[in-house]
Amino acid sequence: METVESVDGPPLETIESVFSVYEIATDGEEIHYYGTPLQAPEPMMRELWGVFREHGYDVQLTVRHGEYVLVAEPLSLGVDSIPWTNVLLFVATVFSTLFAGAMWYGIDPIGEPTQVWRAWPFTVAILGVLGVHEMGHYVLSRYHRVNASLPYFLPVPTLIGTMGAVIKMKGQMPDRKALFDIGVAGPLAGLVATVVVTVVGLYLPPVTVPEGAADPGATQIRLGFPPLLELIAAGIDQPLYTDDPRQNVNPVVIGGWVGMFVTFLNLIPVGQLDGGHILRAMAGDLQETIAALVPGVLFALAGYLYYIGGYNGNTVFIWVFWGLFAGLLAAVGPAVPVNDQRLDRKRFALGIFTFGCGVLCFMPTPIVIVN
């Protein structure tokens, strides 16, 4: 770290009305202002945040070795070079979803590795739904000048070949509008892609399961269908179920199923999930009270399915896991915007609509493994 007399940040006179600076230092691209706050941190940062943003910096107040420090970091909203980590994870997810999709098509990926490519419609459906969801967040982050990465896809050897995708966000949310817009963009964009994928999948022919897979003693994986999927099928007069136990819906429909399940999970109103962002923008501090109740609701659902519904541990585990995860996210807390003024009525109504869409994507038993 180097002590300097002048920097490219905002003029000192625009800072010293609320923060008395006695030393300035640089650490790479960061500028560190050591000083004394002249008012409470929250209103001080609301005033300074806009000043630094005008000069192309994001700023945070920290305490280091007993000294108050304003840490200013240049805003970086674009992609400066090829994001190799994102690219490699995407390629890996293409292969992992092809592998998973092959099994949904009745192809043995180990015994018939040269036939795995035939699962490409499944891969396109899954990556399309997840990618559109995350790009919704990314585009609105750029619009509100919030630093966000391109999507990181997560390849995992599961039934669908992935654990989804995430983007990394850096810096503070300007206001409730930005928090809401960024939070709501992903689920709504993802739902549009989900509906398209589902309609296409329902018009595609069903697939025939491998010989013996439909026998009474065979292990079977059954997916629960959410109300939205049932409504789409009824709306276009296409069947979700077949009379022939040897046939299943086209695996592209599973891409739509994934989109709906991901939408519901992301709209759980806790912490840094989309639902947490949206509800924090709508309800302010009340969001944390609601978030504290969510783990108990999920644990209660798991208990109901196990003790009353008679479902096995595989089905119940999903909600136990999400109850624990929701508790962790609730403890971490939501993103708090710099300007915490109330949300406008149009966005509030859109938030209610979005949570309503989430309800239509809910399924109490997403996956049932039957022996």
Image (tube, grey):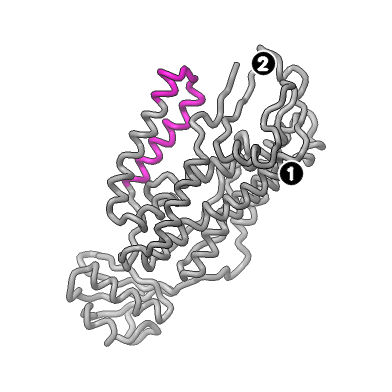
In this view of the protein, can residue 2 be seen by the observer? no
**Looking at this view, is 189 or 21 the one in front?**
189
Dot placed on the residue nearer the N-terminal end, 2 or 1: 1
Helix, strand or loop at mark 1: helix
Helix, strand or loop at mark 2: loop
Q: In the rendered image of this protein, does residue 14 appear above or below residue 109?
A: below
Q: In the rendered image of this protein, does residue 57 appear above or below residue 90?
A: below
Amino acid type at circle 2 is: Ala
CA neighbours of label 2 inside 10 A, class few (<14), some (14 to 19), many (20+): few
Q: Quadrant of the N terminus?
A: bottom left
Left or right of residue 217: residue 108 = right
Left or right of residue 221: residue 4 = left
Q: In the rendered image of this protein, does residue 306 appear above or below residue 35?
A: above
The residue labelled by disc 2 is 218
Left or right of residue 290: residue 306 = right
Magenta residue check for 134: no
| Image spot of residue 87 (x, y percent) | 64, 56
Q: In the rendered image of this protein, does residue 176 appear above or below residue 289?
A: below
**Labelled pair 2, 1 in contact (Cβ < 8 Å):** no
Amino acid type at circle 1 is: Pro
CA neighbours of label 1 inside 10 A, class few (<14), some (14 to 19), many (20+): some
**Looking at this view, is 110 or 14 the one in front?**
14
Image quadrant in which you'd find residue 351: bottom left
Q: Quadrant of the C terminus?
A: top right
**Looking at this view, is 363 or 75 the one in front?**
363
Image quadrant in which you'd find residue 277: bottom left
Question: Which range of residues does the magenta coloring cover?
Answer: 303-331
The residue labelled by disc 1 is 121
What kind of secondary structure does the magenta stretch mostly adopt? helix
Q: Residue furthest right?
A: 114
Q: Which mark is residue 109?
A: none
| Image spot of residue 63 (x, y percent) | 25, 65
